[in-house]
Amino acid sequence: MPENPSEHSTLANNLFTAHRLRMAQLDLMVTILNLSRFIQRHRGATLALLGGDNSFRNQVEALQKQTSAQFDYLQCLNNSADKPLADNDYEQLTLGWLTIIKDWENDDLHHSFEFHSHLLELIIRIARQLSDQV
C-alpha cells in the first residue's frame, strides 16, 4: 500500500481508469452479440420475404433500421473503449452489412442466406477476439 497520499490517489485513479475501460470493452462485446441477434432476425425475415411472404416487409425494414443503429452505437462504444475493435474489422462488418442491404430485394434466397451467414461468422470471430482481450 502506498504511504504517500499522492501515490494512493494515482493508484486509485489508475484502477478506476482500468475499470472504466474494461466496462466499455464489455459493453462493446454485449453490443456485438446483440448485433448478431439483429442480423439473425433480419436473415429470417428477409428469407421469408424473398420466399414470397410479404407480411415480413415491415419487419425487414424495421430490422434494417435497428441493425444500422446498432452499427453506429458499436462505433461509439469502440471509440470510448480505446478501440479494441480494429478499424479493419469494423470496416469488414459495415461492408458486410452494406452488402446485405444493398439491392437485397433482387437477391436470391441462397445468396441472401450466404451474405448473412458470412457476416455472422465474422461477428463470432470478432467476439472471440474481444473476449480474449477483456
Image (cartoon, helix red, strand yellow):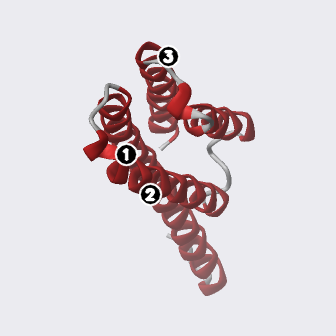
Q: Secondary structure at mark 3?
A: helix
Q: Are marks 1 and 2 in contact (CB under 8 Å)?
A: yes
- Which label belongs to residue 111? 3
Residue depicted at 66% across the width and 32% down the height: 92
Task: Single out the mark in the foreground, 3 or 2.
Answer: 3
Q: Secondary structure at mark 1?
A: helix
Q: Amino acid at mark 1?
A: Phe
C-alpha gap between disc 1 and disc 3: 18 Å
C-alpha gap between disc 1 and disc 2: 8 Å
- In percent of width and height, residue 71 lies at 56, 52
Q: Nearer the viewer, residue 127 or 120?
A: 120
Q: Are marks 3 and 2 in contact (CB under 8 Å)?
A: no
Residue depicted at 60% across the width and 86% down the height: 5
Residue depicted at 49% across the width and 16% down the height: 111
Q: Which residue is mark 2?
A: 66
Q: Which residue is mark 1?
A: 38
Q: Are marks 1 and 3 in contact (CB under 8 Å)?
A: no
Determine whether, in the image, residue 54 is placed left or right of residue 86.
Answer: left
Disc on the earlier residue, 1 or 2: 1
Determine whether, in the image, residue 125 is placed left or right of residue 60.
Answer: right
